[in-house]
Image (cartoon, grey):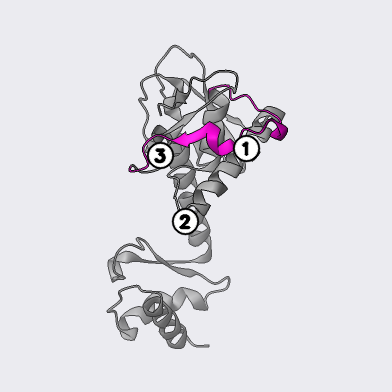
Amino acid sequence: MNIRTRAAQIRSRWLRTGFQCELTLDELEPLFSVYSENPRGKLVIIDKEQAITLKNLLSLFADEYKTYKLDAKAREQATVLHATLSRFNQPVLVNIGDIYQMIRDKLDIKRKYFTLKNANSPVTIENLILSPIKRSEYYLKLKKNAEQKMIYWRKKTLEPKFTLTQLTEQMESVGYKMISSKKGVPIRERIRIIDNEDALTLNNIEILVSIDDESRVRLNV
């Protein structure tokens, strides 16, 4: 298959899937030259929320594309990890870019988290320790409970603005006490939405930590 034919096929796919692209094949063909390389390169859309223009495309050789994917993965992980730093209840003096720099060369650690060297000091680069996650049996059981709740919400056509891991970690942080299913207290009654008119965020749910205590904990994240 020649480069022009390949460019025409991919341009057609973009249009079918809703992308806006007014570039001609004459404009696109030079960018697709990386597809003729061995190993084959890749043409990447930088921002998929924007129209496809020459400025919104990257023509990458195979090794460049590999680096690009690793960078994208690192930035995604950095965003998630940065959002968890508020749990320390200390001023957060690092940004997502700082976290990206810390984890960029540690993507081989698939599951990781941060702890503080000094729990009474602000969250800074110097005060953070990146460690692989070693989940306890308690955490894994909590995760199953949290997953049931996430499934229940989605069946109700609700869309949580947090991940399963984030909900599980919050349940763990408040000391959620699990009970036998024979007790007859549905999980959906122990974790519930505060205001049904608001978005389903962690700040909009409360948790009944123990069935022996009527008080509910409202998360503050």
User: Which is closer to the viewer, label 2 or label 1?
Assistant: 1
Q: Amino acid at mark 1?
A: Asn
Q: Residue furthest top?
A: 120
Quick check: 27 left or right of 176? Answer: left
> Amino acid type of disc 2?
Tyr
Q: Quadrant of the C terminus?
A: top left
- Mark 3 lies on a secondary structure that is loop
Which residues make up the magenta segment? 174-197
The CA distance from mark 2 to mark 3 is 31 Å
Q: Which mark is residue 68?
A: 2
The part of the image, by quadrant, that contains residue 82 is top left
Q: Which mark is residue 201?
A: 3
Determine the residue located farthest toward the front in the rendered image. 184
Q: Upstream in the sequence, badge 2 or badge 1?
A: 2
Residue type pointed to by label 3: Thr
Percent across and percent down for residue 150 are 54, 45
Identified at 48% across, 14% down, the residue is 119
Magenta span has 182? yes
